[in-house]
Amino acid sequence: MTEVAIIGGGLAGISAAVALGEAGARVRLFEARPRLGGATHSFVREGLTVDNGQHVFLKCCTAYQELLRRMGVADQVTVQDRFDVPVLAPDGRTTRLRRTNTPGPTHFGPALARYPLLPLRDRLGTARAALAMMRLDPADPALDRQALGAWLSAHGQGERAQQALWDLFVVSGLNVRTKDASLGLAAKLIKTGLLGARDAADIGVPSVPLGELHGEAAAKTLAGLGADVRTRAKVTAIERRDGGGFRVLADGERHPADAVILAVPHPAAAALVPRAAVPEAGEWAGLGAAPIVNVHVIYDRTVMPHPYAAAVDSPVQWVFDRTRIAGLRSGAHGDGQYLAVSVSAAEAYIDRRVADLREVFLPALGRLFPVARAASVRDFFVTRERTATFCQAPGTRALRPQAATRMPGLYIAGAWTDTGWPDTMEGAVRSGLQAARLVRRLAPSTTRPRGEQAVRAGAVARP
């Protein structure tokens, strides 16, 4: 039986561990933190369950949804019947971006044709830019050397169109401003989600806290598969054994393994990976990091009538009603509404004091939701994800490594690796499945699938 050590308990490590456990491998997973889930986790604050950040997925994120099914929590997310998002402006204008049931890419045509936040000229230009985008190949390396903003400008989409329309999707999807985004990654996001199948962009949101959806579900699933999950276990070295295989050094102990999957963020991976396996690992620092700031506001009454909404011309980008999921009505705060504002590409806010952010975001919410102006704020706090994603700007594709290394049996996983997808939950899961497939190719005779799910796991992540 193949012994596999997986370093990192985020979605990449979890997906690899579940796939290999189902295939009959002996899995040992090391996670330095006290829980699984990686960048998606929850904590308790004054009786409320708070997610570190609001995470959503699209219906086209098939690998992620398959992982939820395999962990038995697919019923703990809600997916829209059709893409339908209120878009708010501080001047009181409100519109909805809602798709039709016509085939893609025409399904957003009617909504864009009457989108009041853009002048007619820009709306007509949007259609032309979308048609030009359809002709791009996201896998073309040349696209990664171009900025999306310059490409859009050349196709009739100037600064206003980029701010009032394209930023709604690009900033939240890539965690970078439209003008600064890699054209290759943006083409993957837009062609797959917005211009593909008509239901591809339908939004899915967790209906339970992330700690329950990912961390607790993964721990339970892996225990059922017989995996040895070790939290609070910091790995400090990966060593090659004489005669083949590896040793993983964690908390002073050496653990043997036939194969290793390194599923941690790129700075940690660069520090751990043997240079003989990836001589270019020092270049991974060039991927950088992009932050996300999450502003949490608890009001004494309902101020937002939507489950979530997007905003333009405002510091608020996307805002979500977290009242029920957090347990507000049964918590210490009593009745009210809990809103979470997700701010991507948040370099301007990541280091600002909470008091400063309060002065920015409470008035901004009041301009979007007039009821909030008369409401009392029961709590205001901020969570910060300083390294939420790598910086998905032009030139990063060449720095993203493949899963296989020059050392047979040692593989790399993570949303920052070369998955063909942006740095998202979907990309993380796909990377873990790819690493798991490579382990099975290394020793196919020593892993035996445990039922039909393992077979599906081997195929779901193919782009």
Image: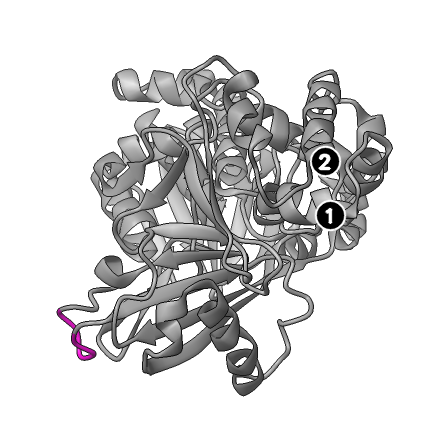
Q: How is the image coloured?
A: one colour
Residue found at the very far left of the displayed protein:
330
Q: Is residue 265 above or below residue 233?
A: above
Identify the image quadrant of the N terminus.
top left
What is the three-letter code of the residue carrying label 1?
A: Arg
Instruction: Confirm whether the magenta stretch covers residue 333.
Output: yes
- Is there a contact, CB below 8 Å, between mark 1 and mark 2? yes
Q: Say which mark, if any, is on residue 122.
A: 2
What is the three-letter code of the residue carrying label 2?
A: Asp
Q: Give the residue pinned by disc 1.
A: 160
Q: Nearer the viewer, residue 379 or 418?
A: 379
**Total number of numbered labels?**
2
Q: Say which mark, if any, is on residue 74.
A: none
Q: Sequence-wise, which precedes: disc 1 or disc 2? A: 2
Q: What stretch of residues is rendered in magenta?
A: 330-334
What's the distance in space between the residues labelled 1 and 2, CA to CA?
8 Å
User: For the stretch drawn in magenta, what is the main secondary structure?
Assistant: loop
Residue found at the very far top of the displayed protein:
103
Residue at horizontal 25%, vertical 52%? Answer: 208
Q: Does residue 180 appear in this view? A: yes
The secondary structure type at the circle numbered 1 is helix
Instruction: Confirm whether the magenta stretch covers residue 363.
Output: no
Q: Is residue 445 above or below residue 221?
A: above
Identify the image quadrant of the C terminus.
top right
